[in-house]
Each structure stands twice: as structure tokens, then as C-alpha cells.
Image (tube, rainbow, N blue to C red):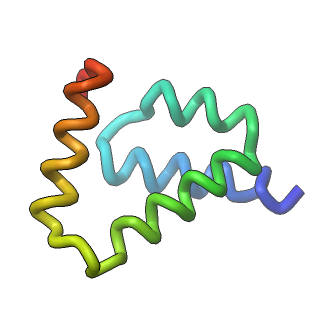
């Protein structure tokens, strides 16, 4: 129940960060518990200082290229 209340908040945050809605978010929004788990994981990944920021960005770009993501 609580997860359903967080879906609009997560959508707004993603829209603010990316500038638009994305398809994976729309898909995950149908499963609020999973969406909240992914959002928490993403926040934790961004906050960690164990890996340098530039290396994180490089890994994201490489992963996007491997799956042919348009972002």
C-alpha cells in the first residue's frame, strides 16, 4: 500500500532528473513494490563513494551501449 503512494513521487523525481518520462518507469509503475526497490537501489548506488563518479558514468554508458539504449 505504501509503495503505491511513492509512485508519483518517483515519477516526478525521474522526470526532473531526465527531463521526460521513460518507458521502463511506466512498466515498473505497474508493480509499485518493485519500482520502490529499484529507486532505493539507484539512490544508494549514486550516493556511494566507493567507486569514482567518472567510473560510474563510464559503466552506465557502456551498459546502455550493450543493450542499445537510446539514452
State the image coordinates of residue 27 (x, y, percent, origin top left): 61, 27
Q: Looking at this view, is 30 or 11 the one in front?
A: 30
* Residue positioned most to the right: 1
Task: Identify the residue at image location x=27%, y=78%.
Answer: 50
**In this rendering, is residue 14 above or below 9?**
above
State the image coordinates of residue 37 (x, y, percent, origin top left): 64, 56
Task: Identify the residue at image location x=21%, y=58%.
Answer: 56
Res 40 quadrant in image: bottom right
State the image coordinates of residue 24 (x, y, percent, origin top left): 51, 30
**In this rendering, is residue 3 above or below 34?**
below
Q: For the N terminus, which image quadrant? A: bottom right
Q: For the C terminus, which image quadrant? A: top left
Is 14 on the left-hand or right-hand side of 19?
A: right
Is 30 on the left-hand or right-hand side of 14?
A: right
Res 63 quadrant in image: top left
Task: Identify the residue at image location x=36%, y=52%.
Answer: 16
Is 27 on the left-hand or right-hand side of 1?
A: left
Count the labels in the image: 0
**In this rendering, is residue 20 above or below 66?**
below
Task: Identify the residue at image location x=45%, y=66%.
Answer: 43
Q: Looking at this view, is 64 or 7 the one in front?
A: 64
State the image coordinates of residue 52 (x, y, percent, origin top left): 16, 72
Amino acid at each position: 500500500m505504501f509503495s503505491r503512494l511513492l509512485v508519483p513521487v518517483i515519477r516526478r523525481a525521474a522526470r526532473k532528473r531526465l527531463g521526460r518520462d521513460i518507458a521502463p518507469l511506466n512498466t515498473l509503475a505497474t508493480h509499485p513494490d518493485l519500482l520502490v526497490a529499484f529507486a532505493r537501489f539507484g539512490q544508494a548506488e549514486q550516493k556511494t563513494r566507493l567507486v569514482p563518479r567518472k567510473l560510474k558514468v563510464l559503466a552506465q554508458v557502456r551498459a546502455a551501449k550493450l543493450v542499445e539504449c537510446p539514452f
